[in-house]
Image (cartoon, coloured by chain):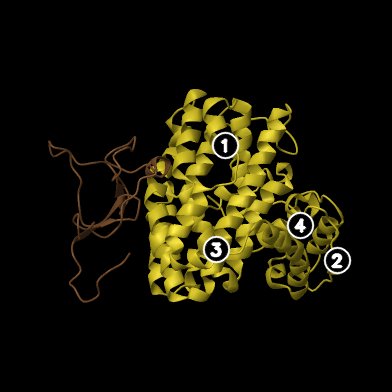
Chain colours: A yellow, B brown
Amino acid sequence: MAGRVIELPAPRGPLGEQLFEALEGPPSGHIAAPTEIDCADPIADEDLQLALYIAYELHYTAIRGVDEGWEWSPVLLAFRAALERPFEEAVAELVPPAEAAELESVGAALQQIVAEDPGPPLSRYMETQGTREQMLEHVVHRSAYQLKEADPHSWAIPRLSPRPKAAMLEVQFDEYGGGSSERMHSVLFAKTMAALGLDAAYGAYLDRLPGVTLATVNLLTGFGLQRRRRGAAVGHLAAFEMTSSIPNRRYGNALRRLGFGREVTHFYDEHVEADAVHENIAAWDLAGGLAADEPEVAADILFGARALLQLEARWASHLMNAWEGGETSLRAPVVPVPA
Amino acid sequence: MATDQSAEIPAATITPYPDGPYLVRGDFVVTDQEGNPLSTERRTIALCRCGKSRMRPLCDGTHKLIGFKAPSAPEPWPGE
């Protein structure tokens, strides 16, 4: 499998037009950072989320026709910061501050937070009623993260003290296939996509992904890239693992009900077993260990967990609302090619 | 993973997690009564502790749905 390369997507507004045009020129070029971004709903704003996603993708992948020197260009970073600000503020409005009692046991607080998951019952719907087209759409949405599964959290590794670092590595080693690229979770997801007749190339469906989907990934990339958000990155990973095994069993059941075989369900079945292990390590050894070593980031651990659940809830509501209205949840429908 | 730095590192450890499964790490094999080994490719496994997993002996996260509660440390004797 070759290295990642994506195409610049079509811009969805003035921010994207300005950024993508600049990226086609030399990294010495100028991008005027917007002083104020006027958007009512930054979390679902098509222009803002796509522009931010591309600014972040420079850290993950080559972009055809874009000089790799843009990755750390000061003007790019200044432009990106202007996009991050309204997004971060909108997320912060959804997340209540941690309570003092929660900080006494971060592991127990995480258990409580995920037990009160604010999202709609998407996995239960898919298991019992989801159609083939809806399942394919779900997979396409998830490709934004799953084809780079584990990568954003890994940026936090060098920033952790020994106990949480060892816990993070115990989880990530398994995510990356335990020494076998064939068992790497991102590779398993690509196999699922191919078996469904979908294009498994990294970034292939970017033009179809709505802002509310890109926001779920931008949230995590923002946590992963910044040392000051190591607590949030860890809390995000913990909540992600703690809300994985049961939904993934349901998605596997949905695919079996729709007549798909092991080559499609393997990714989901693997996550039932893997994340039943990971969630304990992530909550108690990773998040709990970090909170014990660095109490000053304990509140941000819970912020990261709550922010994940809020953005996942926004995304899941978008899917279910679109389907209820008989519409596609993507920006354009996907037509699978039989494998 | 919490390890006791003063003790020799054991070949395998079994750790009950709060309200969750037993995590098994190290050099171990899980077998059925006939001695047939459990097929798993991961280094660390989670064994069901609540009894309600649908893939016993492995954990599948069901303890969260049934409100399973158990501490990590041994429970005290009644009256203690």
Q: Nearer the viewer, mark 3 or mark 4?
A: 3
Q: Residue furthest left?
A: B34
Q: Secondary structure at mark 3?
A: helix
Give the labeled residue for mark 4: A51
Q: Residues within 10 Å of mark 4 (few under 14, many from 20)?
A: many
Question: How far apart are the alpha carbons under marks 3 and 1?
Answer: 25 Å
**Amino acid at the residue labelled 2:** Glu
Near-viewer residue (A205 or B12): B12
Q: Is label 1 or label 4 in front?
A: 1
Of pointers 1 and 4, the one earlier in the residue sequence: 4
Q: CA distance from mark 1 to mark 4?
A: 30 Å
Q: Position of residue A273 (x, y in %)?
A: 37, 44
Q: Position of A139 compared to B64: left or right? A: right
Front label number (4 vs 2): 2
The image quadrant that residue A27 belongs to is bottom right
For label 1, the residue is: A121
Examine the rendered structure and indicate whether residue A303 appears above or below residue A217: below
Q: Give the residue drawn at x 61%, y 37%.
A: A138
Q: Which mark is residue A233?
A: 3
What's under tag 3, amino acid-wise? Ala
Residue A220 appearing in the image:
yes
Identify the residue under disc 2: A36
